[in-house]
Amino acid sequence: MDERPAIPENITHTEYFNLLLKNRVNMSSIPKISNLNAVIQFEILDNGNGIWNIIIENGLVKQVVRDSHERPTCVFTLDSATFLSVIKREMTPQQAFFQGKVDIRGDIILALKMNVLVNYL
């Protein structure tokens, strides 16, 4: 079985979305949330800004799509430094939110679970 990819120190958010996210989530040793079906959208506001939709079916990432027209379940708007700090575990999603570094729209219940979901990232 392949190993879950590590997060390189100098990775960009674009590289993370394009190269690592799907395998890191799907190869995580944490049991999947089998009833999770959602489109989680990240809007990055700087450094190669863009919109990425993470399409999750039965707890697994089916696809990561940039600038798609999927209707998101919840949306996280933030800058690239905050995104990378969260995935590298330097800051929790709650810290980012309460420091005003992330805006959340959509399914707030799912968004509140992001502290658990970030462990898959």
Image (cartoon, rainbow, N blue to C red):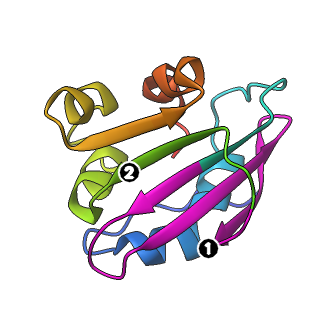
Q: Which x, y percent locates residue 64?
A: 68, 65
User: Sequence-wise, which precedes: disc 2 or disc 1?
Assistant: 1
In the image, is residue 56 above or below residue 15? above
Seen in the image, is 108 located left or right of residue 61?
A: left
Seen in the image, is 25 located left or right of residue 87?
A: right
- What crowding class fits label 1: few (fewer than 14 Cα within 10 Å), some (14-19), or many (20 or more)? some
Amino acid found under the numbered disc labelled 1: Arg
Task: Name the image quarter holding residue 2.
Answer: bottom right
Q: In the image, which residues are magenta?
A: 41-69
What residue is rendered at 74% in x and 25% in y? 33
Say whether residue 52 is magenta: yes
Q: Secondary structure at mark 1?
A: strand
What residue is rendered at 26% in x and 31% in y? 97
- As drawn, the residue found furthest toward the left would be 99
What residue is rendered at 71% in x and 49% in y? 26
Residue receiving disc 2: 77
85 or 3: nearer the eye?
Answer: 85
Q: Which x, y percent locates residue 9?
A: 26, 68
Find the distance from the CA under tag 2 to the CA under tag 1: 14 Å
Residue receiving disc 1: 66
What kind of secondary structure does the magenta stretch mostly adopt? Answer: strand
Q: Secondary structure at mark 2?
A: strand
In the image, is residue 50 above or below residue 96? below
Task: Name the image quarter holding residue 14.
Answer: bottom left
- What crowding class fits label 2: few (fewer than 14 Cα within 10 Å), some (14-19), or many (20 or more)? some
Q: Is residue 3 visible?
A: no
Q: Which x, y percent locates residue 17?
A: 53, 68
What residue is rendered at 57% in x and 75% in y? 19
Q: Which x, y percent locates residue 15?
A: 46, 77
Seen in the image, is 108 located left or right of residue 69?
A: left
Say whether residue 30 is magenta: no
